[in-house]
Amino acid sequence: MKYVIKALEFSIIIALLTLSVITFNKINQVEISNAQSYREDQMHLAIVTDEISSYAYQRFLNGVETEVKAVDAVYEVYEIGDLSIDDIVQMLLITEVDGVVFRLSDNNLAGKGIDACKEQGIFTIVVGNDAPESARDIYIGTNKFNQGRQAATLAIEAIKEDGNIGVILGSEYHFEESSVSNNFIGGIQDVVSKASLVELTEVAY
């Protein structure tokens, strides 16, 4: 029995040592990567996201790249997958980023992480959907009504102000609360109602 207990203690010690080495290596890799990619005087930003393949994300990233070049900053993208939000936040705290952008399908899931960043003086921004219970500095959303107006204006120009317009909406509208779709369609109807030869005849998902 004594040997079994000693063997068990030995196994636990080995497991703890292994975990410590893995954690140290992860942290060290982040620190080495960051040290090679930015200067001390540069602003260091991070983007936390749970999707990197959509067209909307690529457009978002193009805007980020343009702005960081203009202010001589650098940024890194952390995708939630192999790492959890908690793991990523720990890395952000260790690397002492200046600011972090949370762009998740549900930013409320990052509430504790946002608060942890704020406690360390990291400027936090949430994009797409708000996390109002968190200590985020800024929420950047989208105005669906204005998007609808712009889409209708382009469509009317394309059909030379004479004809019917159909709208196909994707999951971005279908799965969110109905006001999102209503605002977008409302923007379209606001423009279409002022064009005498144009009619909105179809809305599909």
Image: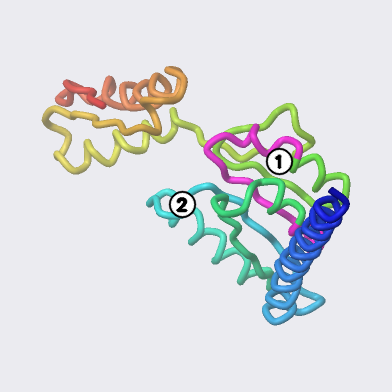
Q: Which image quadrant: the C terminus?
A: top left
Measure how far apart labels 1 and 2 are at the Cα level.
19 Å
**Foreground pick, 174 / 182:** 174
Magenta-drawn segment? 91-112
Residue drawn at 22 percent across, 36 percent down: 156
Residue drawn at 73 percent across, 78 percent down: 32
Residue drawn at 75 percent across, 60 percent down: 19
Query: In this picture, is 203 found above or below 10?
Result: above
**Foreground pick, 108 / 29:** 29
Give the image location of residue 154, x and y in percent.
27, 41
Q: Is residue 128 left or right of residue 202?
A: right
For the residue marked with disc 1, what is the amino acid?
A: Ile
For the residue marked with disc 2, what is the amino acid?
A: Tyr
Residue drawn at 15 percent across, 40 percent down: 160
Residue 42 painted magenta: no
Q: Which residue is mark 2?
A: 57
Give the image location of residue 199, x and y in percent.
18, 22
Q: Which residue is mark 1?
A: 138
Query: In this picture, is 178 found above or below 93?
Result: above
**Foreground pick, 179 / 174:** 174
